[in-house]
Amino acid sequence: MFLARLLTIAGIIVVLALILFFLVSQSRGPDEGHIEIKNLNQKYEQLGLMLKSAILPKKQLKKDLKAIKKEHKAREKRPEPERKRLFVIRFHGDIRASDAGSLAELITALLMIANKDDAALLILESAGGTVHGYGYAASQLTRIRDRGIHLTVAVDKVAASGGYMMACVANRIIAAPFAIIGSIGVLGQVPNFNRLLKKHDIDFEQIAAGEYKRTLSMFGENTAEGREKFRQELEEAHDLFKRFVKDNRKQVDIDAIATGEHWYGSRALELQLIDELKTSEDYLTRAASDHDVYELVHQRKKRFTEKLLSSFTRISDMLHGHG
Protein backbone atom coordinates (compact mmCIF):
# COMPACT_ATOMS: atom_id res chain seq x y z
CA MET A 1 0.00 0.00 0.00
CA PHE A 2 2.85 2.36 0.85
CA LEU A 3 4.47 1.69 -2.53
CA ALA A 4 1.17 2.27 -4.35
CA ARG A 5 0.68 5.60 -2.59
CA LEU A 6 4.26 6.61 -3.34
CA LEU A 7 3.82 5.83 -7.04
CA THR A 8 0.53 7.75 -7.08
CA ILE A 9 2.15 10.82 -5.53
CA ALA A 10 5.08 10.56 -7.95
CA GLY A 11 2.67 10.33 -10.87
CA ILE A 12 0.79 13.43 -9.73
CA ILE A 13 4.09 15.34 -9.38
CA VAL A 14 5.13 14.32 -12.91
CA VAL A 15 1.76 15.44 -14.35
CA LEU A 16 1.95 18.78 -12.54
CA ALA A 17 5.51 19.28 -13.76
CA LEU A 18 4.46 18.58 -17.35
CA ILE A 19 1.59 21.06 -17.08
CA LEU A 20 3.99 23.68 -15.68
CA PHE A 21 6.49 23.11 -18.49
CA PHE A 22 3.66 23.33 -21.02
CA LEU A 23 2.44 26.66 -19.63
CA VAL A 24 5.98 28.09 -19.55
CA SER A 25 6.72 27.00 -23.11
CA GLN A 26 3.42 28.43 -24.35
CA SER A 27 4.05 31.77 -22.64
CA ARG A 28 7.33 32.21 -24.48
CA GLY A 29 5.53 32.43 -27.79
CA PRO A 30 6.41 30.66 -31.05
CA ASP A 31 10.04 30.09 -31.98
CA GLU A 32 10.84 31.85 -35.23
CA GLY A 33 13.30 29.13 -36.23
CA HIS A 34 15.45 29.51 -39.33
CA ILE A 35 15.30 29.12 -43.10
CA GLU A 36 17.21 26.40 -44.95
CA ILE A 37 17.93 26.39 -48.69
CA LYS A 38 18.16 23.12 -50.60
CA ASN A 39 19.72 22.87 -54.06
CA LEU A 40 17.37 20.56 -55.94
CA ASN A 41 19.66 20.35 -58.99
CA GLN A 42 22.23 18.57 -56.82
CA LYS A 43 19.52 16.34 -55.38
CA TYR A 44 18.37 15.18 -58.82
CA GLU A 45 21.95 14.63 -59.98
CA GLN A 46 22.67 12.50 -56.91
CA LEU A 47 19.51 10.48 -57.48
CA GLY A 48 20.63 9.80 -61.04
CA LEU A 49 24.08 8.69 -59.87
CA MET A 50 22.56 6.38 -57.25
CA LEU A 51 20.39 4.73 -59.88
CA LYS A 52 23.33 4.34 -62.28
CA SER A 53 25.48 2.79 -59.55
CA ALA A 54 22.76 0.19 -58.96
CA ILE A 55 22.09 -0.87 -62.56
CA LEU A 56 25.12 -0.02 -64.74
CA PRO A 57 28.12 -2.30 -65.21
CA LYS A 58 31.21 -1.08 -63.33
CA LYS A 59 33.05 -0.08 -66.50
CA GLN A 60 30.13 1.98 -67.78
CA LEU A 61 29.64 3.55 -64.35
CA LYS A 62 33.29 4.60 -64.14
CA LYS A 63 33.08 6.04 -67.63
CA ASP A 64 29.97 8.07 -66.76
CA LEU A 65 31.48 9.32 -63.49
CA LYS A 66 34.63 10.40 -65.30
CA ALA A 67 32.53 12.30 -67.87
CA ILE A 68 30.54 14.05 -65.11
CA LYS A 69 33.72 15.10 -63.26
CA LYS A 70 35.21 16.37 -66.51
CA GLU A 71 32.09 18.41 -67.22
CA HIS A 72 32.14 19.89 -63.71
CA LYS A 73 35.79 20.96 -64.08
CA ALA A 74 35.14 22.47 -67.49
CA ARG A 75 32.14 24.34 -66.09
CA GLU A 76 34.26 25.86 -63.32
CA LYS A 77 36.84 27.15 -65.81
CA ARG A 78 34.58 28.65 -68.46
CA PRO A 79 32.24 31.56 -67.80
CA GLU A 80 28.66 30.44 -68.15
CA PRO A 81 25.64 32.59 -68.88
CA GLU A 82 23.57 33.14 -65.76
CA ARG A 83 20.74 30.66 -65.55
CA LYS A 84 17.29 31.60 -64.40
CA ARG A 85 16.38 30.62 -60.86
CA LEU A 86 13.30 28.86 -59.57
CA PHE A 87 12.45 29.18 -55.87
CA VAL A 88 10.25 26.46 -54.39
CA ILE A 89 8.03 26.76 -51.29
CA ARG A 90 5.68 24.18 -49.79
CA PHE A 91 2.48 24.91 -47.89
CA HIS A 92 0.49 22.22 -46.08
CA GLY A 93 -2.60 23.90 -44.69
CA ASP A 94 -4.76 22.93 -41.73
CA ILE A 95 -8.13 24.42 -40.82
CA ARG A 96 -6.49 27.52 -39.24
CA ALA A 97 -3.82 27.99 -41.93
CA SER A 98 -1.29 27.68 -39.09
CA ASP A 99 1.69 27.73 -41.46
CA ALA A 100 0.76 31.16 -42.85
CA GLY A 101 3.36 32.78 -40.58
CA SER A 102 6.10 30.49 -41.88
CA LEU A 103 4.90 31.19 -45.43
CA ALA A 104 5.27 34.92 -44.80
CA GLU A 105 8.87 34.40 -43.58
CA LEU A 106 9.76 32.33 -46.63
CA ILE A 107 8.25 34.85 -49.05
CA THR A 108 10.11 37.70 -47.33
CA ALA A 109 13.37 35.79 -47.79
CA LEU A 110 12.50 35.01 -51.42
CA LEU A 111 11.77 38.63 -52.26
CA MET A 112 15.10 39.74 -50.83
CA ILE A 113 17.02 37.85 -53.54
CA ALA A 114 14.63 37.16 -56.42
CA ASN A 115 14.17 39.42 -59.42
CA LYS A 116 11.80 39.57 -62.39
CA ASP A 117 13.87 37.03 -64.35
CA ASP A 118 13.33 34.44 -61.61
CA ALA A 119 10.24 32.34 -60.92
CA ALA A 120 8.53 30.87 -57.88
CA LEU A 121 6.67 27.62 -57.35
CA LEU A 122 4.30 26.97 -54.45
CA ILE A 123 3.48 23.29 -53.86
CA LEU A 124 0.11 23.58 -52.14
CA GLU A 125 -1.98 21.08 -50.24
CA SER A 126 -5.02 22.29 -48.32
CA ALA A 127 -8.70 21.49 -47.98
CA GLY A 128 -9.36 25.00 -46.65
CA GLY A 129 -10.35 26.45 -43.29
CA THR A 130 -10.96 29.83 -41.68
CA VAL A 131 -11.61 32.81 -43.93
CA HIS A 132 -9.21 35.15 -42.12
CA GLY A 133 -6.41 32.54 -41.97
CA TYR A 134 -6.48 31.72 -45.66
CA GLY A 135 -7.13 35.32 -46.63
CA TYR A 136 -3.85 36.19 -44.91
CA ALA A 137 -2.01 33.33 -46.62
CA ALA A 138 -3.36 34.40 -50.03
CA SER A 139 -2.24 37.99 -49.40
CA GLN A 140 1.31 36.71 -48.84
CA LEU A 141 1.31 35.10 -52.28
CA THR A 142 0.08 38.37 -53.76
CA ARG A 143 3.39 39.92 -52.65
CA ILE A 144 5.25 37.65 -55.09
CA ARG A 145 3.01 38.42 -58.03
CA ASP A 146 3.01 42.16 -57.31
CA ARG A 147 6.82 42.18 -57.55
CA GLY A 148 6.60 40.90 -61.13
CA ILE A 149 7.91 37.42 -60.27
CA HIS A 150 6.09 34.66 -62.13
CA LEU A 151 4.27 32.45 -59.62
CA THR A 152 3.09 28.92 -60.33
CA VAL A 153 1.01 26.91 -57.88
CA ALA A 154 1.15 23.11 -58.08
CA VAL A 155 -1.65 21.03 -56.58
CA ASP A 156 -0.89 17.32 -56.29
CA LYS A 157 -3.74 16.32 -53.97
CA VAL A 158 -6.14 19.06 -52.90
CA ALA A 159 -6.64 22.83 -53.08
CA ALA A 160 -10.22 23.40 -52.01
CA SER A 161 -12.06 26.34 -50.46
CA GLY A 162 -9.35 28.44 -48.74
CA GLY A 163 -6.74 26.33 -50.52
CA TYR A 164 -8.13 27.43 -53.87
CA MET A 165 -8.31 31.01 -52.60
CA MET A 166 -4.52 30.79 -52.29
CA ALA A 167 -4.04 28.99 -55.61
CA CYS A 168 -6.01 31.48 -57.70
CA VAL A 169 -3.47 34.22 -56.89
CA ALA A 170 -0.88 32.48 -59.09
CA ASN A 171 -0.05 33.42 -62.67
CA ARG A 172 -0.42 29.72 -63.50
CA ILE A 173 -2.00 26.75 -61.74
CA ILE A 174 -1.03 23.15 -62.45
CA ALA A 175 -2.67 20.11 -60.88
CA ALA A 176 -2.59 16.33 -60.96
CA PRO A 177 -5.47 14.71 -62.88
CA PHE A 178 -7.18 13.49 -59.69
CA ALA A 179 -6.37 16.48 -57.47
CA ILE A 180 -9.44 18.01 -55.77
CA ILE A 181 -10.03 21.59 -56.90
CA GLY A 182 -12.67 24.23 -56.15
CA SER A 183 -15.23 24.19 -53.33
CA ILE A 184 -15.75 27.94 -53.67
CA GLY A 185 -18.27 28.27 -50.88
CA VAL A 186 -18.55 29.21 -47.20
CA LEU A 187 -19.74 26.92 -44.43
CA GLY A 188 -20.82 27.74 -40.90
CA GLN A 189 -22.12 25.22 -38.39
CA VAL A 190 -22.78 25.45 -34.65
CA PRO A 191 -24.08 22.63 -32.41
CA ASN A 192 -26.83 23.64 -30.00
CA PHE A 193 -27.32 21.96 -26.61
CA ASN A 194 -30.19 24.14 -25.38
CA ARG A 195 -32.83 21.37 -25.34
CA LEU A 196 -30.43 19.05 -23.52
CA LEU A 197 -29.82 21.69 -20.84
CA LYS A 198 -33.56 22.27 -20.42
CA LYS A 199 -34.14 18.52 -20.09
CA HIS A 200 -31.78 18.46 -17.11
CA ASP A 201 -33.10 21.75 -15.63
CA ILE A 202 -29.85 23.60 -16.32
CA ASP A 203 -30.11 27.35 -16.92
CA PHE A 204 -27.76 29.12 -19.31
CA GLU A 205 -27.37 32.88 -19.29
CA GLN A 206 -25.59 34.96 -21.90
CA ILE A 207 -25.35 38.73 -21.76
CA ALA A 208 -24.20 40.70 -24.81
CA ALA A 209 -24.03 44.39 -25.69
CA GLY A 210 -24.90 44.92 -29.32
CA GLU A 211 -27.86 43.46 -31.21
CA TYR A 212 -25.79 41.03 -33.25
CA LYS A 213 -22.82 40.47 -30.94
CA ARG A 214 -23.84 36.81 -30.89
CA THR A 215 -26.10 35.50 -33.66
CA LEU A 216 -26.10 31.75 -32.93
CA SER A 217 -25.36 30.20 -29.55
CA MET A 218 -24.20 26.72 -28.54
CA PHE A 219 -26.11 26.70 -25.26
CA GLY A 220 -28.77 29.43 -25.51
CA GLU A 221 -32.02 29.32 -27.45
CA ASN A 222 -31.46 30.49 -31.02
CA THR A 223 -33.90 32.83 -32.71
CA ALA A 224 -35.07 33.18 -36.31
CA GLU A 225 -33.50 36.67 -36.40
CA GLY A 226 -30.16 35.28 -35.23
CA ARG A 227 -30.21 32.53 -37.86
CA GLU A 228 -31.02 35.02 -40.60
CA LYS A 229 -28.18 37.32 -39.54
CA PHE A 230 -25.77 34.38 -39.47
CA ARG A 231 -26.89 33.42 -42.99
CA GLN A 232 -26.33 37.00 -44.17
CA GLU A 233 -22.79 36.95 -42.78
CA LEU A 234 -22.07 33.72 -44.67
CA GLU A 235 -23.45 35.21 -47.89
CA GLU A 236 -21.27 38.29 -47.45
CA ALA A 237 -18.17 36.14 -46.97
CA HIS A 238 -19.14 34.08 -50.03
CA ASP A 239 -19.53 37.22 -52.16
CA LEU A 240 -16.06 38.38 -51.09
CA PHE A 241 -14.65 34.95 -51.94
CA LYS A 242 -16.28 34.99 -55.39
CA ARG A 243 -15.01 38.50 -56.11
CA PHE A 244 -11.48 37.52 -55.06
CA VAL A 245 -11.46 34.49 -57.38
CA LYS A 246 -12.90 36.47 -60.29
CA ASP A 247 -10.35 39.28 -59.86
CA ASN A 248 -7.51 36.76 -60.02
CA ARG A 249 -8.94 34.26 -62.56
CA LYS A 250 -10.82 36.46 -65.00
CA GLN A 251 -11.30 33.54 -67.41
CA VAL A 252 -13.63 31.57 -65.10
CA ASP A 253 -17.41 31.64 -65.14
CA ILE A 254 -17.77 32.56 -61.48
CA ASP A 255 -21.50 31.78 -61.27
CA ALA A 256 -20.89 28.27 -62.62
CA ILE A 257 -18.03 27.39 -60.28
CA ALA A 258 -18.97 29.21 -57.04
CA THR A 259 -21.55 26.63 -56.01
CA GLY A 260 -19.50 24.99 -53.25
CA GLU A 261 -18.79 21.97 -55.48
CA HIS A 262 -15.34 20.53 -56.03
CA TRP A 263 -13.95 18.83 -59.12
CA TYR A 264 -11.05 16.57 -60.02
CA GLY A 265 -8.16 18.05 -61.98
CA SER A 266 -9.34 16.96 -65.43
CA ARG A 267 -12.75 18.59 -65.00
CA ALA A 268 -11.20 21.62 -63.29
CA LEU A 269 -9.13 22.16 -66.44
CA GLU A 270 -12.30 22.27 -68.54
CA LEU A 271 -13.77 24.82 -66.15
CA GLN A 272 -10.54 26.88 -66.37
CA LEU A 273 -9.95 26.62 -62.64
CA ILE A 274 -6.44 25.39 -63.52
CA ASP A 275 -4.18 25.84 -66.55
CA GLU A 276 -2.47 22.47 -67.02
CA LEU A 277 -2.51 18.86 -65.84
CA LYS A 278 0.92 18.20 -64.37
CA THR A 279 2.39 17.06 -61.06
CA SER A 280 4.88 19.12 -59.08
CA GLU A 281 7.56 16.43 -59.57
CA ASP A 282 7.22 16.63 -63.34
CA TYR A 283 7.37 20.43 -63.24
CA LEU A 284 10.50 20.45 -61.05
CA THR A 285 12.49 17.83 -62.95
CA ARG A 286 11.81 19.61 -66.24
CA ALA A 287 12.66 23.02 -64.76
CA ALA A 288 15.98 21.70 -63.38
CA SER A 289 17.31 21.27 -66.92
CA ASP A 290 17.50 25.04 -67.54
CA HIS A 291 16.98 26.59 -64.08
CA ASP A 292 18.89 26.66 -60.83
CA VAL A 293 16.23 25.27 -58.51
CA TYR A 294 16.27 26.12 -54.80
CA GLU A 295 13.77 24.98 -52.19
CA LEU A 296 13.22 27.27 -49.20
CA VAL A 297 12.24 25.49 -45.99
CA HIS A 298 11.28 27.10 -42.69
CA GLN A 299 12.65 24.96 -39.86
CA ARG A 300 10.95 25.71 -36.58
CA LYS A 301 12.60 24.52 -33.38
CA LYS A 302 10.42 22.14 -31.42
CA ARG A 303 8.96 23.29 -28.13
CA PHE A 304 9.76 21.34 -24.98
CA THR A 305 6.32 19.75 -25.01
CA GLU A 306 6.74 18.66 -28.64
CA LYS A 307 10.11 17.09 -27.86
CA LEU A 308 8.61 15.36 -24.83
CA LEU A 309 5.69 14.03 -26.87
CA SER A 310 8.11 12.85 -29.55
CA SER A 311 10.17 11.02 -26.90
CA PHE A 312 7.06 9.33 -25.48
CA THR A 313 6.04 8.29 -29.00
CA ARG A 314 9.46 6.75 -29.67
CA ILE A 315 9.37 4.90 -26.35
CA SER A 316 5.87 3.64 -27.12
CA ASP A 317 6.99 2.46 -30.56
CA MET A 318 9.97 0.66 -29.03
CA LEU A 319 7.77 -1.08 -26.43
CA HIS A 320 5.24 -1.99 -29.09
CA GLY A 321 8.04 -3.40 -31.24
CA HIS A 322 9.37 -5.54 -28.42
CA GLY A 323 5.85 -6.70 -27.59
Image (spheres, rainbow, N blue to C red):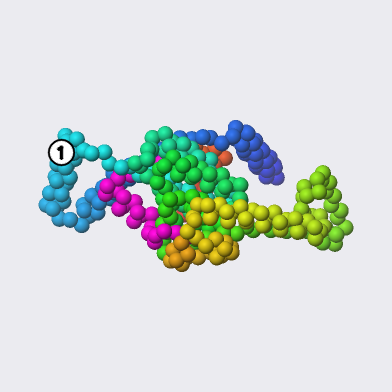
Residue at image coords 76%, 53%: 215
Q: Nearer the viewer, residue 266 or 285?
A: 266
Where residue 85 sits, quadrant-wise, is top left
* Residue 238, horizontal then vertical, whole percent: 62, 56
Q: Nearer the viewer, residue 242 or 102?
A: 242
Q: Residues within 10 Å of mark 1 (few under 14, many from 20)?
A: few
Q: Nearer the viewer, residue 170 or 283?
A: 170
203 inside magenta stretch: no
* Residue 273, horizontal then vertical, whole percent: 47, 60
The answer to whether residue 168 is left or right of residue 194 is left
Where residue 116 sits, quadrant-wise, is top left
Q: According to the image, label 1 marks what residue?
A: 74
Residue at image coords 61%, 50%: 131
Residue at image coords 43%, 55%: 173
Q: Which residues are magenta?
A: 273-297
Task: Give SS at disc 1.
Answer: helix
Is residue 124 depicted above or below 269 in this figure? above
* Residue 170, horizontal then vertical, whole percent: 45, 50
